[in-house]
Every structure is written in structure tokens, then in C-alpha cells.
Amino acid sequence: MTRAGLLGFPNVGKTTLFNALTGLEAFTAPHPYTTTEPNVGTVKVPDSRLERLAVLENSRRITHAGLELVDLPAVRSGSIRGLGAGREPDLLLAVVRAHDSGAVPVDEHGTDPVVQAEDLLVEVAMSDFEMFERRNERLLKEAAADPSLRPVAGAIARAAEQLGEGTPLRQPAWSDIELRAFRDMAPLSLLPCAWVVNVSEDDADHNMLVGQVRQAVPATDPVLAVSALIEEEVAGLEASQRAEVYEGLGLGEGATARVVRTVYDALGLVTFYTVNRRDARAWTVPAGTGAREAAGRIHSDMERGFIRAEVATISGVIACGGWAKARSSGAVRVEGRDYRVRDGDVMMVRFSV
């Protein structure tokens, strides 16, 4: 399951956003550092297409895709606590606060989201710098005795220099050899990052705030505005009531769908579907995944014994009135193992064991 880590300074609304997206009730309080250990929850990915497909096929169960969300302890100056190598998130969701509230005190970083974004970039880079600098010192000595280590030592030295300037590692392109040299250190600044500007419902121009933050962060980092408090309050409502509130407040589809879409876009993920009377299910894979490898996500036997995949678009299946009608109308095609799965594909895998 894809994992996103919520990162931010104290009292920016990280845990409030975590609760809003997961439907959990992690403890929050109007003072800093209430999150001392990571909170972990799962976000059910909203998917109306999957639900319509399940109705057409009379599926007894609907299994949505999921996003694991980790609410990391607040960033303290000179200290960032992550999850450790092997458990690091696939992406960082950096939260910055853009409003003042009498109920929640303001941290030393204030309520200017641009200042917080710039400070957070430096904190993450410097946290990685300390790790790379220690490794660099050791590798320089080892490379002097073993010439085969010089390419790795050179990559670590260049990375340490960049981090020392406050620049995250994800900005330039690194070779596969260099990335392998970094991997066991699990640097946070190498991870893709999306920014959430936590706004007040009274903020008139969210687009202006988003634009200001976008200018302050790497060009590859997406930025979106969310009112975490409103989203937490709405999260406990029934789906129909949530839709009414979103419409009344002009919040569109709500934060969950927008955050998930941002994460998927940043990581280059696509969703495909399987459906039968027992289960209608959404699966998430990287864009460019072959049909055989995608079948392996369903079951390892399907990958080993893959013969072919019958494929149709989910919009086509819904328009035809179900899988059987889509097949009879010619909307279903046969693809081989090298077919690259596309977002919105419905797949029926044929295999032999």
C-alpha cells in the first residue's frame, strides 16, 4: 500500500488533517508536540466509478484502494523524527499553516505559509546533511584505500554539499548508481513532496496562498489548499450530508479526493479494476506496469501462469451496462503480457497453473 508521511512544524494542523482523511480520532491539543509517536491510519480512496461498476455486476463486496497515512511527530529545530530505513514513506505531505486561531497558539514559525515552507525545506535538508556528512567522512578514508568506492564517495560528497546549501536531493536528477548509494540512508529530502496549505474557511483567496507557496518550493512539488478543521468536522457525516456541506461551502469534492489525486499524480500511480459477483476491487500500480506484473498484484499465480488479459475501460463497461454486455458489444479487447496498464482499465486475467 502506498504510504504518505505528514510532516510539519508544531500546531500547523497535521493531526487534524490526519483525522479528517482517515476518519480516526488521534489526540490533538492546543499546545505543541502532542504527537510524540507516529499515528498510522488508512485513507479509503473515493471512487464513484468502482461503486457504479459494483452495482452493475451485483458484487457482494466493494474494495476501495487505500492510502496509508503516517502522522509524524512535529519537526523541532535541528531534529526530524521519521520512521527509519525500510519504513520511510513513499511521499511527504508537508503541512503549512496559513491562518491564525485564538484556540491554537502560533508556533515560532508563525502563520506565513511561505516562511514555514522555506524553513521546513531547510530543516529536512539539514537533517539529511548531518547523515550524509558523517557517511562522507568515512567513505573518503575507505575510498583512499579502495578505488572501487570512489564513485560512491563522490556521489555522497556532492549530495552533502547540496544539502549543506539547504537544497533537497529530489531537485536534480541522480543516476541509478548514485541513488543506490543513497538508498540505505533513506534521506527524506529525496522523497517526492506535496504541500498542503492549511487555510481558514474565511480565507478569501486560497489560490493566492497556493501560488505563493508554489514559488517557494521546488517546481516539481504540487501544492493544494485544505481547511483541515472543516474537513475534520465534516468527516463524521454521512456521504450525502458531506456532499451537501461541500456544495454549500464551495469545497467541491472535498479534501480526501484532492489529496489522493495529488499523491497519485506525484508518484505516477494509476488505478485498474477487477470485478465479479464476489468482489469489485480497485488496484493501484505505477504507470507503465505490464499486464502480467499487474496480474501479480491480484495473485502471484496469475503472474506465473499469465496467458492474456481481457481489458476494457471502466467508463465503457459502465456505459454498456456491465462486463458481459461490454464483451458482447466488442468493447472488450485482448492484451498480452507486455500491455501497459492504463488508468481506468477493467481487467479479466486468464491464467494457467
Image (cartoon, rainbow, N blue to C red):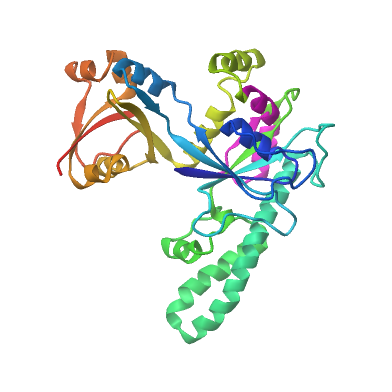
Quadrant of the drawing holding the C terminus: top left
Q: Quadrant of residue 306?
A: top left
Side of 210 where 265 appears, left or right: left
Q: Residue at x 22, y 45 (%)?
A: 301
Observer able to see residue 343: no
57 or 256, which is in the foreground?
Answer: 57
| Position in image of residue 154 (x %, y %) | 52, 72
Would you place residue 307 above or below residue 167 in this image? above
Would you place residue 269 above or below residue 175 in this image? above
**Is-magenta flag for residue 196?**
no
Q: Residue at x 69, y 27 (%)?
A: 206
Observer able to see residue 315: yes
Name the residue at the right extreme. 102
| Position in image of residue 274 (x %, y %) | 30, 30
237 or 227, which is in the foreground?
Answer: 237
| Position in image of residue 265 (x %, y %) | 48, 37
214 or 13, which is in the foreground?
Answer: 13
Q: Residue at x 57, y 72 (%)?
A: 135
| Position in image of residue 263 (x %, y %) | 51, 38
293 or 32, which is in the foreground?
Answer: 32
**Is-magenta flag for residue 215?**
yes
Q: Which residues are magenta?
A: 209-234
Side of 217 where 61 appears, left or right: left
